[in-house]
Image (spheres, rainbow, N blue to C red):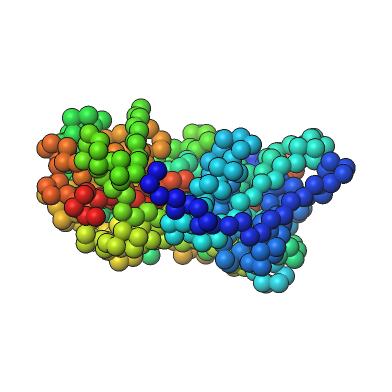
Amino acid sequence: MSTRTLRGAAAIVGVTDASSPTGELDTRGRVLEAAMIKAALDDAGLTLADVDGICYSGVATGIAEYLDLHPRYVEGTFVGGSSFEVHVEHAAAAIATGLCEVVVGVYASTPRQDRRLGASVPSFGPMGPDVGAEWEAPYGPRMPMTSYALAASRHMAQFGTTSEQLAQIAVDTRRWAALNPRARHQDPIMVDDVLASPTTVSPLHQLDCCLVTDGAGAYVLTSAERARDLARPPVYVLGAGTGLDHWVISQMPDLTVTPGAISGPAAFAHAGITPDDVDVLMGYDSFTITALLHLEDLGFCAKGEGGAFVEDGKLGPGGALPMNTNGGGLSYTHPGQYGMFLLVEAARQLRGECGPRQVQGAEIAVAHGCGGVLSATGTIVLGTEATL
Amino acid sequence: MTTRREPTASDESIAFWDATRSQRFVLPWCTDCDIAIWYPRLVCPQCRGTAVEWRDASGAATVHAYSIHWKPGNGRVEDDGPYVVALVDLAEGARMMTNIVGCPVDAVTVGMPVHLEWEPLSDGRHLPVFRPA
């Protein structure tokens, strides 16, 4: 290692813990977690308004939603009891590189209370209310589809977006898939085909929805110094951003704005680029509405104008903004957590390895992942040697 | 009664579900911020204080977004026919998921005024759903 940028870059400034000689605390779950977070911040002389990063040994979106936190850094590594030390390592690196400034890590577990109260409160999970099971599942949603259908419903009502405009995204993505011999679906489709495909939850049609396929991928990341000596042309990380603002759809602050509106501009600023500089956009397309929201939130067009923006086919081969050149989650593959494939295709495009679907002269690519139900986003700006 | 997956309950929502046994619609309020909180929690998501109390709510709401479910989701059955899953904005300011009932599925629109209706659950609790006002 050539540098030690971690050394002295971050410091622990507040701590708290709770325990009792009885072996039992008098609160548990989210209430206890919230109390710990507040006490540690009090100790530091800070407030929740200062917090822009969270570490949690599990699904961090739950506690963030509960406290209405919108962190730009989230660390959810789970490796058992040592998770917290691993979190500090990662959070210190994040602070050192300016990804965030104030990170709070929290842990609460009450096995004795849980065991004692368990019989009387049968459905209570170990870490707080099961929000989806309690406040959404009784209404019979088809998750995750319903969440995206609701976002599409709202976007249509608020901005006049049409099913035809959403369908154009599926059509252009399929045009890319036709150039990828490993794509699940390669036959061309038209807007009318999308509109004629069955609707299980309106306003989405089957061809507005991603595939369910097997799939796998991996990547290797190393220092720029080592990268230059290796077999392939390096694909550099130029910028990164994270956004997180809810876990279940009924808690989404605005159904038409994803946390990509946080992570995208942050990543672009980090990289020193604007949307005009992007040669290839890999934007998570779990549904056509997902991709449309990314275009607006990342700043390729104004909020509400995504429908008109995509209408002319500019996302397809030969278009002004090549998007999802592998054929996307809509036509290439989608095994569940599709973000891996965004990174792989972006790297291949920047290495010039994409054959008939290669975007000529591609120097900057963006991999924009979107997880949960429009819940959390991660934006990575990648570039060739020439962009450094 | 519609076939459905019945809701769980937690420490933070027992008061809500108990009130539904007598068909009372209550919302948790932060008395410091003077806002309704949804979903029920014992910590205010705005000020993160714990001055939370339960207040009766009007049952008036507006459709914020909706989706017609032509095929049933988990817990629902085909025989129930198509139904509407919606997010509604309560008059008190909170937003919740629900079903819109009591009208043809294609009569629902964004912005439509709706009102609370109770659907009985198997354990004596009631589930809030909404119908056109």
Left or right of A272 on screen, residue B2? right
Camera sees residue B3: no
Left or right of A244 on screen, residue B126? right
List x then y, in percent, for residue A319.
14, 52
Considering only vertical position in the picture, is A126 above or below A266?
A: above
List x then y, in percent, for residue A302.
30, 66
- Given residues A189 and A100, the one toward you in this image is A100
List x then y, in percent, for residue A169.
25, 49
The residue at the point 71 percent across, 72 percent down is B32
Q: Quadrant of residue A11?
A: bottom right
List x then y, in percent, for residue A218.
35, 33
Image quarter of the N terminus of chain A: top left
- Given residues A296 and A105, the one toward you in this image is A105
Left or right of A13 on screen, residue A347? left
The residue at the point 61 percent across, 64 percent down is A48
Instruction: Tell which residue pokes out farthest to the top in this image.
Output: A214
Image quarter of the C terminus of chain A: bottom left
Considering only vertical position in the picture, is B85 above or below A269?
A: above
